[in-house]
């Protein structure tokens, strides 16, 4: 981002002042706008048994799954096409545990334990591969889990799926009450988002971005990169399981379709359309895709075609997804404000060269490499 | 080829020893029986025409390649079987010809990553990395000491060639190496950028042992005291820079039939 | 014993169909590093097209030809429009093909509906014969599929090993940049391989439509098989596709027959073993 630096005090003019004021106001509004969005969500959730609240709850559940996928895909570069499989395992585990006479609370614990164990075990195989191979392996993994749900009828009741017996309750806190359930989903979503954002901002999160950017170099700096990828996988899979538990509480039913390939694909679409590597973006992506699925489908029968085309369009035009666009616009605005301010004060725009710090994961789908020279002979 | 840099038998342990290193690739001998002893604190160069085996030798010293035969020792400790990240922990740092910085990350993030590499905090999950003030402070200092202070927020892929090279060296320095291997740090740089790199190299801490592959004799002269000449994988000559520049064989290598 | 032989033949038949699909997939990957996730959808699309053409012309072979031509054309168009725009990023290409799956599946659903369909085999192919082995009665259609697969494999092998075009393709698989530097028209080679891959997939779709049927989800099933094949055999390796197809076809078939609950999961065993022992695939090159 280069500034003009030509010394003209452009913004000293009335037009410039007006523009500056407008831009600054828009920047100040981001906070309130976000707050308003939260308020809207709360209101929708609180209102009776309306279908709006069901919609929002669905969005929140899938947002948890999408954010979990983003943690490994957007930060460590591990794009998994099998994440819906782990969501399914979480949901099935709750249902199967209850079928075997465990209490709902115990079932939750068992489900999370199963997902964790599965993640720990399968991670050993999954992280032996990188890039495209990893995508392929996770697709295969997800499909195998789907196959188990479909064919291990003794355990999973096959195509019919399993209906949940009851939801957890503890005294006054009863998830059988729709309002309590919806609020719980919201809280879990918020906690998940908070945790994942924290992890992403931690040194470990930074190391994941290093893995994605240049794994060999990171290894040369003393990092055990395989371990870091493994941990990212385990964390991501665990939260997919959490989403699964929420899923079956909200829907009362789990069937193999929830784990079919298209479900895995939906999650990836949510992440990419929302914005790889931003945690918030994929949550937004979940909102959009659930809207496509529940709302758009009533007006447009061919909504899946639209969704596919959207993904293709995003990949072609804005690889950073929706969030990437928002950030790019924000950066332009910040740079413009800096320039206008400098102009107003009569100083030439500082050609800082970098503008405001360009933090955060990149907008591309793959790591950028610095311009390098061709390899020399040894 | 005997030690050209350490004097008496009771001299302190050499920083880096290559003992009859060989590397063959399916019939091609890239490095043939090279032995070197580099003293602690020495500034040592490795020169030779393209294809002489210099980078292969480096790869064996830093662990990217296993030697077909021979050993490598760091401060007396045999490290031949150790993987690169283990050697890093023992104090051996290395830069690469094809610069490998973290292109997507800012200069500050690059350096922070490197600085966390030495400690267990790299696995820390619950605090933002920006809150580790000591580390980010060190990163800012490192950048400032070598002229990159104003670029802390810039993505590494957007730096100039010379700045990327500097960042590369800084990343390796962040690990507080005792021995630093530099693979053609000036390759592809414009004359102006070379000055920058040269200044950086000369201002490196005195106690740091430096081993450098470089084609640019002028640059070498300003930085190293002695060097070894490689040709077709073998060590041809070892001595001070003056001795090497005066040597007939070397002149023939560079300017004669086998020249660059 | 006769049952086991019949089962094995079933497995080989499946292997044949899988081979036709995965050979195209692996060649496209080998020469272009493109992971075409939509390959399974193209298989299904070809099957549906063949079904319709057979329905209206009453000629099985017209159906086969039409399917192959249609999917070949589709592959050609896809490569020329979408893939060339995304050459800078492998992940972008992969994700674009993911989006394509939804488009193809949805359009197919609109045209052919969601009810499973079967492609009918004409005349003698629809009947069964008694094999010289153990007096087994075995469907001719399956024998036909097996035969066709072998012939195509041989033809592809000849193409790759004995023709100039094949040499270019193999060189491209080995070292993409070098081939370009040698002045070979890489773009042409890319388009050719992509088109060929499409044709093979569509062709396989009609054949698969006879014994496996055409149903929603057949594309994911076949994609999974193809992926298992390339993991086991090695991404980019033609011989690996042959080996992998045999292995996966037999494993899946035996699995379905003898371990109904774990049929899908059984194919996971060779995949895991290969990943643990030789991650680049049995016949793959290191670094893939």
Image: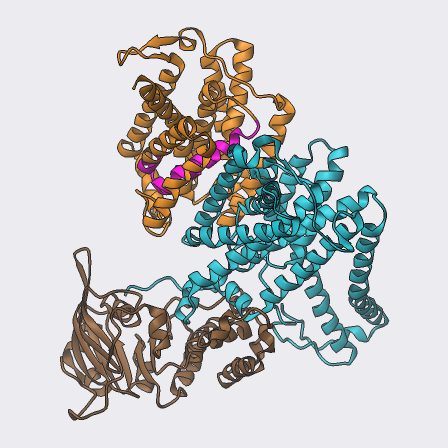
Chain colours: A cyan, B brown, C orange
* Residue C5 point in image, percent of width and height: 31, 20
Query: Which range is magenta?
Result: C216-241
Magenta segment main secondary structure: helix
* Residue A236 point in image, percent of width and height: 56, 55
Give the quarter of the image for residue A334.
Answer: bottom right
Vertical comparison of B166 with C94: above or below: below
Give the quarter of the image for residue A329.
Answer: bottom right
In this orientation, does residue A303 appear? yes
In this orientation, does residue A321 appear? no
* Residue B199 point in image, percent of width and height: 42, 85
- Quarter occupied by the C terminus of chain A: bottom left
Vertical comparison of A254 with A168: above or below: above
Q: Which one is in front, C65 or C204?
A: C204
- Residue drawn where x is 69% and y is 32% of the image: A302
Q: Which one is in front, C102 or C6?
A: C6
* Residue A149 point in image, percent of width and height: 54, 37
Q: Which one is in front, B259 or B80?
A: B80
Vertical comparison of A52 with C136: above or below: below
Is residue A87 shown left or right of residue A339? left
Give the quarter of the image for residue C20.
Answer: top left
Farthest residue in the top direction?
C123
Vertical comparison of C109 with C193: above or below: above
- Quarter occupied by the N terminus of chain A: bottom right
Residue C79 lies in the magenta-colored region: no
Is residue C55 shown left or right of residue A176? left
Residue C224 lies in the magenta-colored region: yes
């Amino acid at each position: 981002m280069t500034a003009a630096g030509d010394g003209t005090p452009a913004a000293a003019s009335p037009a410039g002042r007006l523009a500056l004021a407008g831009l600054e106001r828009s920047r100040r509004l981001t906070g309130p706008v976000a707050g308003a969005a939260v308020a809207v969500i709360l209101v929708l959730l609180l209102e009776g048994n309306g279908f709006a609240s069901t919609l929002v709850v669905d969005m929140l559940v899938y947002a948890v799954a999408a954010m979990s996928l983003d943690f490994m895909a957007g930060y460590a570069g591990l794009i998994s096409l099998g994440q819906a499989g782990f969501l399914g395992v979480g949901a099935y585990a709750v249902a199967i545990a209850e079928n075997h006479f465990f209490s709902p609370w115990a079932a939750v614990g068992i489900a999370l334990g199963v997902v964790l164990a599965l993640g720990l075990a399968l991670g050993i195989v999954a992280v032996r591969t990188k890039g495209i191979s990893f995508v392929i392996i996770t697709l295969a993994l997800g499909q195998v889990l789907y196959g188990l749900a479909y064919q291990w009828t003794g355990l999973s009741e096959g195509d019919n799926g399993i209906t949940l017996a009851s939801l957890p309750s503890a005294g006054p806190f009863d998830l059988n009450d729709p309002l309590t359930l919806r609020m719980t989903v919201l809280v879990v979503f918020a906690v998940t988002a908070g945790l994942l954002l924290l992890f992403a901002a931690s040194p470990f999160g930074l190391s994941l971005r290093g893995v994605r950017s240049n794994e060999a170099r990171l290894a040369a700096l003393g990092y055990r990169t395989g371990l870091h990828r493994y941990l990212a996988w385990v964390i991501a899979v665990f939260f997919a399981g959490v989403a699964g538990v929420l899923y079956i509480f909200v829907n009362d039913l789990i069937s193999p379709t929830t784990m079919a390939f298209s479900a895995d694909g939906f999650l990836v679409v949510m992440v990419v359309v929302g914005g790889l590597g931003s945690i918030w973006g994929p949550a937004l992506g979940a909102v959009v895709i659930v809207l496509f699925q529940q709302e758009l489908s009533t007006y447009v029968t061919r909504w899946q075609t639209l969704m596919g085309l959207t993904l293709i369009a995003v990949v072609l035009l804005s690889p950073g997804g929706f969030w990437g666009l928002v950030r790019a616009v924000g950066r332009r605005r910040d740079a413009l404000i800096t320039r206008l301010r400098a102009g107003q004060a009569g100083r030439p725009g500082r050609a800082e060269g970098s503008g405001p710090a360009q933090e955060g994961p990149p907008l591309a789908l793959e790591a950028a490499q610095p311009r390098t020279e061709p390899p020399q002979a040894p | 080829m005997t030690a050209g840099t350490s004097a008496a038998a009771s001299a302190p342990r050499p920083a880096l020893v290559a003992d009859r290193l060989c590397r063959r690739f399916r019939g091609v001998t890239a490095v043939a029986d090279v032995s070197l002893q580099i003293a602690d604190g020495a500034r040592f160069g490795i020169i030779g025409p393209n294809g002489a085996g210099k980078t292969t030798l480096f790869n064996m010293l830093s662990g990217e390649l296993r030697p077909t035969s021979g050993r490598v020792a760091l401060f007396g400790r045999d490290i031949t079987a150790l993987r690169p990240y283990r050697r890093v922990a023992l104090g051996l740092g290395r830069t690469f010809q094809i610069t490998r910085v973290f292109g997507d990350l800012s200069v500050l993030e690059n350096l922070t990553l490197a600085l966390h590499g030495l400690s267990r905090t790299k696995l820390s999950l619950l605090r933002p990395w920006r809150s580790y003030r000591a580390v980010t402070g060190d990163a800012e200092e490192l950048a400032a000491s070598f002229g990159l202070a104003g670029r802390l927020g810039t993505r590494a892929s957007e730096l100039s060639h010379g700045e990327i090279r500097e960042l590369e060296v800084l990343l390796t320095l962040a690990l507080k190496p005792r021995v630093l291997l530099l693979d053609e740090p000036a390759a592809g740089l414009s004359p102006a950028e070379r000055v920058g790199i040269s200044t950086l190299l000369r201002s490196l801490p005195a106690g740091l042992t430096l081993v450098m592959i470089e084609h640019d004799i002028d640059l070498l002269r300003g930085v190293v005291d002695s060097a070894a000449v490689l040709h077709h994988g073998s060590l041809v000559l070892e001595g001070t820079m003056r001795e090497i520049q005066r040597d007939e064989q070397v002149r023939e290598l560079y300017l004669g039939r086998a020249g660059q | 014993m006769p049952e086991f032989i019949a089962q094995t033949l079933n497995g080989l038949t499946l292997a044949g169909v899988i081979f036709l699909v995965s050979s195209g997939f692996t060649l496209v990957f080998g020469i272009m590093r493109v992971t075409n996730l939509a390959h399974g959808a193209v298989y299904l699309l070809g099957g549906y097209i063949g079904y319709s053409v057979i329905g209206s012309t009453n000629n099985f072979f017209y159906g086969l030809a039409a399917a192959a031509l249609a999917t070949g054309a589709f592959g050609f168009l896809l490569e020329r429009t979408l893939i060339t725009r995304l050459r800078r990023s492998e992940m972008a290409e992969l994700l674009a093909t993911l989006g394509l799956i939804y488009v193809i599946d949805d359009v197919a659903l609109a045209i052919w509906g969601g009810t499973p369909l079967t492609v009918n085999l004409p005349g003698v192919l629809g009947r069964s014969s008694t094999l010289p082995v153990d007096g087994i009665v075995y469907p001719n259609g399956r024998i036909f599929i097996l035969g066709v697969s072998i012939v195509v494999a041989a033809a592809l092998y000849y193409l790759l090993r004995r023709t100039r075009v094949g040499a270019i393709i193999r060189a491209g698989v080995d070292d993409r940049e070098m081939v370009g530097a040698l002045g070979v028209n890489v773009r042409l080679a890319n388009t050719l391989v992509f088109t060929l891959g499409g044709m093979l997939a569509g062709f396989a779709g009609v054949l698969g439509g006879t014994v496996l049927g055409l149903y929603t989800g057949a594309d994911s099933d076949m994609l999974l098989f193809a992926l298992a094949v390339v993991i086991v055999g090695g991404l980019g390796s033609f011989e690996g596709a042959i080996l992998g197809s045999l292995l996966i076809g037999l494993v899946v078939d035996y699995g379905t027959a003898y371990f109904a609950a774990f049929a899908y999961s059984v194919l996971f065993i060779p995949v895991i073993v290969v990943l643990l022992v030789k991650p680049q695939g049995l016949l793959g090159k290191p670094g893939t």
